[in-house]
Amino acid sequence: MPHRCLLCYITDRSQFPGDERARRRALRAKIAEAARAGVDYIQLRERDLSARELETLAREVADLVRENSLSTRLLINSRTDVALAAGADGVHLRADDVEPHEVRQVLDVSARPPLVIGQFLVAISCHSNEDVIRAESEAADFAVFAPVFGKRGTAGTPAAGIAALREACRAKISVLALGGVNLENAASCLNAGAAGIAAIRWFQENKIEDVVRALWAL
């Protein structure tokens, strides 16, 4: 590969042990760890929180990311309003969410400075080649294609497979592989054309510096 692969840590505090306070403490620590390790994107994906709770957490996390990295970009899951209010770097949309151009319309009327708006990222989850083509046509900054190898512990979620990933990676936007990716199969994703790897458990259950080092060595 001419360039190192992109990395995206997707958060899920519910996977940490303990009560809510302990889980949030563990989440903040893991986010700081990811930023220090050089992960490119952190997607705050705490879908059970209210808008107010998510904004409060996002503000805390945005400060953590800035304190620990000059390059890591923070994306908020689905909520463009929260991303703007918290000073995040962008938004990550679900496959069935609003379209990227609708996010751009929100940015056009927001109070965010134009220079910063121009740097606001819009990523989107994709589950088929058609989804990726649509994301490209909507000028999304990158797509996360899933599940490549399936989701651990989730019955009835069929794996798309490497062939489908390879087809999706023909798009002109960057495509990150998600879903059952590990050190044994990550290289096959990159060889299929993926610009990088996105993961939840792989980052949360391991020392992120070790995961990053292993992936960048591929």
Image (spheres, rainbow, N blue to C red):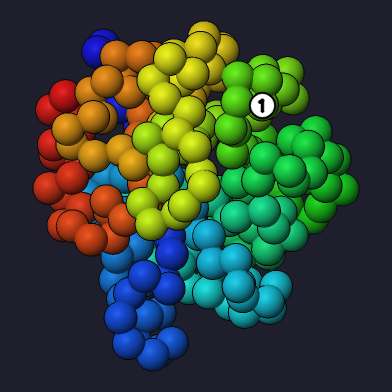
Q: Is residue 38 left or right of residue 131?
A: left
Q: Where does residue 179 sit, x and y in percent of width and height?
A: 40, 41
Q: Where does residue 134 sit, x and y in percent of width and height?
A: 72, 22
Q: Is residue 129 left or right of residue 65?
A: right
Residue at position x 29%, y 71% in the image = 29
Q: Where does residue 31 sit, x and y in percent of width and height?
A: 34, 62
Residue 160 position (above or below residue 68): above
Residue at position x 68%, y 63% in the image = 82
Residue at position x 16%, y 24% in the image = 218
Whether residue 70 is visible to the viewer of this picture, yes or no, is no
Residue 15 position (above or below residue 172): below
Which residue is more in the foreground, 168 or 173?
A: 168
* Three-letter code for the amino acid on which mark 1 is drawn: Asp
The residue beneath circle 1 is 131
Quarter placement of the N terminus: top left
Which residue is more in the foreground, 140 or 162?
A: 162
Whether residue 216 is visible to the viewer of this picture, yes or no, is yes
Residue 51 position (above or below residue 100): below
Q: Where does residue 36 sit, x and y in percent of width and height?
A: 24, 54
